[in-house]
Every structure is written in structure tokens, then in C-alpha cells.
Image (cartoon, helix red, strand yellow):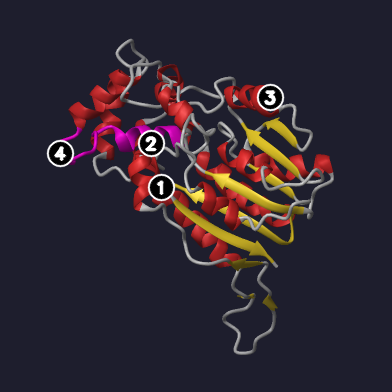
Amino acid sequence: MAPSGSHAAAGHHASVLLEESVQALALVPDGIYIDGTFGRGGHSQAILAELSEKGRLLGIDQDPEAVAWANAHMGDDPRFEMAHARFDQLAELCEQRGWTGRVNGVFLDIGVSSPQLDEAERGFSFMREGPLDMRMNPEAGLSAEQWLAQVEEKTLMKVLREYGEEKFAGRIARAIKEVSGTEALQTTTQLAEVVKAASPRKERHKHPATRTFQAIRISVNRELEGLEQVLDQSLSVLAPGGRLAVISFHSLEDRMVKRFIRDHSTPKDLFPASPIEIEVVAPVLKKVGKPVFPSETECQRNPRARSAVLRVAQKL
């Protein structure tokens, strides 16, 4: 799950696949839309630009700083509303507004945003000295430091292997647990040094702590569980013909999105072992086009876009 860098306003941080995302949503001027990962509003502003006075856009973000930014910069627009919530509260937020089954488009841009990554005190980056936090909502849950102090070595190894696809998960987990809960593991740079020392081989052009930071962040924020839930919830909130557009930055997320679209866009045989076709569940989604990748020009302008992929589906 590489950093997205796409939750951004024009002139602040570059929004990844901006035109492609807006195009993918096939915007209806009077429609209802949801930006489940508001960040700094780059995609939201582009969506609003296409909506009429009757159109509605709900922004969702669990980061209090993103919510404050939205209210300060876009709060005066009567078509726009900002919710301080996780995106896996999508169904609940739609139910509160009477939008269940009426939403014309759900947009998700998965991963850590550029503002979060660039602010050292948020603790997302091993490139900047900061407290070992990594929470997308610093007001809720355990920080990375607290989580590392209480997690068992075996569980940590599993997290590093599954969420970080880290080859040396066992060695790194052991090294981290030897110093967790002490003054030697309170900052991002301290963790990066522990991982670096425990890694027997170095990859070219990649810091040894990259995968570890990613894995811990995914676990601390329950990112994959959240993604699975919001994808499922999109089925109930979307109107027939409504679009789901998802940008992901990491193979784990992209596989989940790809599998979700595939599973819901193909008929299901409830009794595959039976020689007679007893009952088939009709698909509820239609895959729209092929995966969309950033152009070389965009990647040069914004290196964080390089691993992005956009997948689109339409509710039947």
C-alpha cells in the first residue's frame, strides 16, 4: 500500500488519476456522490465542479485534520457535507441521510495521504523523525508504539509477512520485540534503525523499513478489514447504474478490489456439485473497462502515483 499522495487540493498535493477518476464516475449533474477518502479534497473539488445545484457530495475522512480542512475550505458549499468517520461506516451514513440505494457514485482512494506522510508528527514516514503513531485518526485506537509494545512476536511476524510481504518477517519481529516498550522504540527513526539492523539483505532503491512500516500501519488502522467492509456496503448504497471507482496503491488492496468486482460481476451457481443447474444468483455488478494506470507524465510529475491502479464497476 504505497502512499497515495492523492487526497489533495490543487496547488497543494497532486491528486492521482484525477481526470480518469471523474470520468470513471460518469457523473450525473443532479446525482448523489460519496468521496470516502477526502484527504485534502482534490477529487471532491473535481466532482463538485461537475454537479448542478441539486447535486450532492458527502466527503468522509477519519482524520480530524482532513475534516477541519474540508470545513474551512468547502464548508460554504450547500451541495457538500463532511463526515468525520471511517469509510466502512458508509452504509450507516447513507441510511442516516435516506440515501440507501440512491447513490450515483462511490469513490475511494485507498492508503495514507500525502499530508499524513509529509507531517513528521503523524509518524507514518521513516524518512522523518517523529513519534511512532501511524494512526489515521490520532484520537482513536492504539498508536504504533502502543501496539508494538503489546503485540506478541508471533502475531507481529504474521502481520509483517502478510501485510508487508516481508521476507525477513521472523528476524525483524524478533528484533522489534526485543526493544518494544522501551525508550529505544518511541520514534519512527528508531524503528527504522531496528529494522535496518535486522535485515540481512538490502534492496536497491528501497529502504529496508518500507515493508515493515506499511504492515504496521495497515494493522494499526485495520485498513484491509475496512476496505472489505466498505466494498460490501457499496452494493447496498449504490443506485442501479451507480459507479464504484477505487484507486489502490498496493497489491494486497488491488487484489481485494479485483476479486470483489469479479465475484459480484459473474453469476454464482449455488450448488456447483449438482449435475443439474438448480439455482444461479445473478451478478449485481458489471466491470467497467480495464484497470487504469497513471501516465508516464503523471508519474514524473508525482512519483507517488507510480503504483496507483484505478478499477471501476457499475451496479446492475
First in sequence: mark 2 vs mark 3 = 3
Q: Which mark is residue 250?
A: 1
* Region in magenta: 199-218
Residue for badge 3: 71
Instruction: Give the structural element (helix, strand or loop) at label 1.
Output: loop
Q: Residue at x 82, y 39 (%)?
A: 96
Q: In this view, does 208 lie above or below 254?
A: above
Which quadrant: the C terminus? bottom right
For mark 4, what is the residue?
A: 201
* Mark in the foreground, 2 or 3: 3
Q: Nearer the viewer, residue 12 or 39?
A: 12
- Residue type at mark 1 is His
Q: Tell me the CA gap for discs 1 and 3.
A: 30 Å
Q: Nearer the viewer, residue 105 or 180?
A: 105
- Asked if the magenta segment contains residue 188, the reply would be no
Query: Where is residue 287 shown, x and y percent of the image?
Result: 57, 67
Could you classify mark 3 by the number of other residues whose Cα lies within 10 Å: few (under 14), some (14-19), or many (20 or more)?
some
Mark 2 or mark 1: name the one nearer the start of the chain.
2
Res. 158 visible in picture = no
Amino acid carrying label 3: it is: Asn
